[in-house]
Amino acid sequence: MESLVCTGCRREVDGRLWQARCPECGEPLEVTAPPGGTVRDGAPLLERFANFLPARSLGLHDPAAVLTLGEGNTPLLPLETIGKRIGLPRLLVKVEGANPTGSFKDRGSVAGVQRARALGFRAVGTVSTGNMASSMAAYAARAGMRGVVLVSATIPRAKLAPIAAYNPLLIGVEGDYGRLYHLSLELGPKLGVAFVNSDDPYRVEGQKTLALELWQQLRRQVPDAVVVPVSSGGHMAALLKGFRELYALGHIERLPRLIGVPAAGCGPIAAAYRLGSTVPVPWAEVRTIAKAIANPSPPSGRRLLQAARSGAPLHFLSVTDDEIMAAYWQLSQEEGIFAQPDAAAAVAAAHKLAESGVLRPDETVVAILTGHGTKDLTPLESNAPVRLRTCSLDELPGVLESAL
Amino acid sequence: MESLVCTGCRREVDGRLWQARCPECGEPLEVTAPPGGTVRDGAPLLERFANFLPARSLGLHDPAAVLTLGEGNTPLLPLETIGKRIGLPRLLVKVEGANPTGSFKDRGSVAGVQRARALGFRAVGTVSTGNMASSMAAYAARAGMRGVVLVSATIPRAKLAPIAAYNPLLIGVEGDYGRLYHLSLELGPKLGVAFVNSDDPYRVEGQKTLALELWQQLRRQVPDAVVVPVSSGGHMAALLKGFRELYALGHIERLPRLIGVPAAGCGPIAAAYRLGSTVPVPWAEVRTIAKAIANPSPPSGRRLLQAARSGAPLHFLSVTDDEIMAAYWQLSQEEGIFAQPDAAAAVAAAHKLAESGVLRPDETVVAILTGHGTKDLTPLESNAPVRLRTCSLDELPGVLESAL
């Protein structure tokens, strides 16, 4: 069995127990580096990258026991219209909204649930208000396990439908969301529920496959820069881990720069980064339309800030809601790509970084579109940009002619 | 330039003009059989199957000009839990909801818009109330063309958001929906709008790739039976065309049986099939929760019924709303797959066909899940199956313990 290592104090921890954070220093645990080997094209995600994952811990030796809903293999598309206008002709987007439940979370959920099943758990859970909740509920159902989803009691009812579809045990908890995260990790092992939260070591292994897949899709090259929305920090930490392992295995000659993008209305990691601190700045008032990246106490924040201080090529840049919404409409109306507001934040940041010269026209830049637009229709409901003209069949020719 | 052939009277028609139906008999036109050749793995959908498509008409010679949003390559997943229970252990689902706009329509839209662009059109349109509308709006945006979407004036406002995101010209038309379909085809060429409706010859070419992709995913075999929701009939006609061409090219030794599934509350083609007629039975009152398969005057109905009479292995079976909803909940809660109600109809039909012995336990059966569950949340809103318990952080351990 692989052991786990603390990302803070580097202590080794017994990997046979379900734990996500170091019993000594409290920082997230991570899986040790993989052996490497071939990529198995055409297989489900976990099997495809089995040589780059903790295959034994995940129980990947038996292909029939590999969990899948068809996650991964998401499109990598050029943004020609936007790219040319903002001076990044080699701008690409990775459309993670094409995953089974419409977000990048599925990569992590499939690994976390696979691990929990391999350990003999009969229930898996998560603390989330959105993408991770429906993702975990779906994979729990697929694995024949009980799903447990803890949400904030103030969650709008409309957000519950895509979670409730899978019929998990759904509990709205009143009180501090950051405390709920830690309470779930404490209660889980006692109650037999494997909580696969944002920075669970096996979730991070699953999220890491995004880095591996980019390398595969770009014909064994990596981009010059990857721009990714940042909230808890787990996704960005996973990308860094994936690229670092490719580097350690000798598959790539340099790491891409990773740019983490919070909304200006909730940026604890970016604020600490600007101050030169390795502790996320506590965020009192969250104000952004990009709800999926609005975590005021990011559990993987310290890990990222420490990596940046130790020389990892990490950068952080906040974008305003106006910048996010401009990118949101450009993506759908100019490129035909409908993404969640938080996903559009990555494209908004690429725009700013091109203007300031941090990203150059000759560079290959990948913006990660973390979720599908249909997962959060708020901008289309609140701003009412839906313009419908009505007419009769007889009037239609005239109406069309004057409108075109 | 390839010519088009009438599916009714077999007359040849000039393929350089934009027309979808025979100027003589009014039946849908189709593209003549392709040359065949290799499948180009890893390329965008149209390029991947270029040897099986009218490559010259579509302008596929220049890879840089091939339109794509990453459509196709959708998961083919075993339904182990449901399959075992209903006595079809080799039941698979093709998850078309994984396409860029969440439905199978994207395969057809990419081909139709590519063809319209190759012919020099600057606007593309469609008549649709749902999946086809958002799909066409997305590909119009991607191609840098004006999108025109004609909907029924009575469309619920909630259904407009995923269409309006792409900012097409959106017109609600009062009056008969069947007449609107034909009026659009008449007005289109005059106004410079290429209407890519349900049975447009190039849309059918795009939809046909589903048959090709199944053959590819099943290692150059075809399933024994394919169960597909049926509404206008264009999708089923495209699947038949795809399998027939594979057969004509010598790639497969037999055709799979194709079973078309309407909702019992709107089944003009199935009713005609039961009566032994080749003319769809006019349907006065549409009553079903599966709105995406509720076309009361299906434009490709005659074509399918005539093919069935001439010996094509086509069958039709209606399912009730209760049967649809049972399959809908089983898919999400037992398999982790969230599909539109109309998509679940295919699984409901497979269940009935297994019971009646038409589908046998040793057969490989593929049910086509045409659209993603997030595209129509009606069942989760109207039946209110969302059960949320609330508690405080302190109460959580007790609440969890008693619920698990």
Image: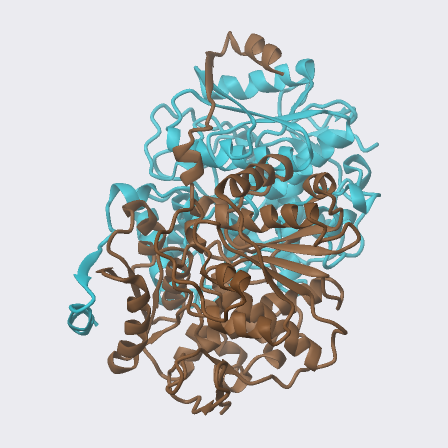
Chain colours: A brown, B cyan
**Quadrant of the rendering where the C terminus of chain B is positioned:** bottom left
Q: Residue at x 73, y 25 (%)?
A: B121
Above or below — where is B348 with respect to B136?
A: below
Instruction: Judge whether residue B296 can be spotted in this image.
Output: yes
| Residue projecting furthest to the front | A275
Residue B333, image quadrant = bottom left
Residue B351 x, y percent position in the rendering: 38, 56
Above or below — where is A84 with respect to A118?
A: above
Residue B151 x, y percent position in the rendering: 48, 24
In depth, the one of B108 and A399 nearer the eye is A399
Q: Is residue B213 left or right of residue A298?
A: right
**Quadrant of the rendering where the N terminus of chain B is positioned:** top right
Residue B161, image quadrant = top left
Residue A99 x, y percent position in the rendering: 52, 57
In depth, the one of B115 and B86 nearer the eye is B115
In depth, the one of B151 and A344 nearer the eye is A344
Q: Residue at x 49, y 21 (%)?
A: B178
Above or below — where is A41 with respect to B291?
A: below
Instruction: Judge whether residue B362 can be spotted in this image.
Output: no
